[in-house]
Image: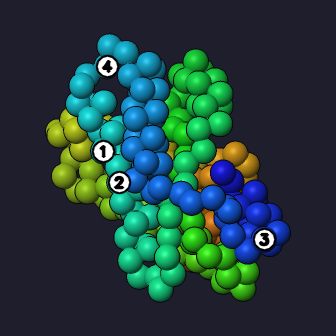
Amino acid sequence: MGPGLDFYMATRNGNVSDQKTNSLVNILSFLIINSFLAVLFLLGANPIIWGAYLTILVLMVAGGFIGTIFSSKKWEYRFSQGGIIIPIAYGFLGLLIPMVGNWQPKIIDKKTYRSDLGKIALPIWLMYLGILLANLLLGESNLFLSALSNFAGIFVIFNMIPIYPIEQFGGRRILDWNRKIYIALWIISAAILILGFI
């Protein structure tokens, strides 16, 4: 679900969902379905590239989880399986775009909702930048790190585009939370991406 829909549901009833959510089931669904899409559109690719893509998916979940550790709220991982058409369409265009899952607070505080989501999205963006920097410093001799860096670079670009449907990757959450932090991350990301192409 996109942040806009989340916020609508939050302001409507104070909860993201009236139903109980099993975070572990949603995380496994996120990994399994997106791994299937990777097999479908990376057919014939080096297994190391598959491994790098699966790793970046795991890090997407883990990065958000790290953010929840520093929050006093209780969180759950939500993953909607209804948006599979868009990733498949992108796949046929040569773009491997995962279906997106996100951490959501179990109980919505309307006053802090946007900042809560932004603080969860922040470590994920920083993680992508860390991968890009590691690849710049260590060089591209390591195929796994190089592939991981390529995927991280794609998701950094997605974070730099806070419009639907790309906003679901987290950039919009940070923009809505703190515009100054978003601009700083945007500038740093642009500089690292430019250095990577030089």
State the SS at label 3: helix
Q: Quadrant of residue 144?
A: top left
Taking the spot 73% from the left edge, 74% from the top edge, the residue there is 14
Q: Residue furthest front?
A: 19
State the SS at label 4: loop
Marked residue nearer the N-terminal end (4 or 3)? 3
Mark 4 neighbour density, 10 Å: few (under 14) some (14–19) many (20 or more): few
Q: Nearer the viewer, residue 9 or 70?
A: 9
State the SS at label 1: helix
Asked whether, in this view, residue 97 is left or right of residue 148, the answer is right
Callout 2 amino acid: Leu
Where is residue 59? Give x, y as percent.
Answer: 35, 54
Mark 1 neighbour density, 10 Å: few (under 14) some (14–19) many (20 or more): some
Q: Which mark is residue 45?
A: 4
Visible in this render: residue 161? Answer: no
Nearer the observer: mark 1 or 3; the answer is 3
Give the spatial CA distance, label 2 vs label 3: 31 Å
Residue underneath mark 3: 13
Taking the spot 42% from the left edge, 26% from the top edge, the residue there is 36
Residue underneath mark 1: 55
Marked residue nearer the N-terminal end (4 or 1)? 4
Asked whether, in this view, residue 179 is left or right of residue 30, the answer is right
Marked residue nearer the N-terminal end (2 or 4)? 4
Asked whether, in this view, residue 82 is left or right of residue 142, the answer is right
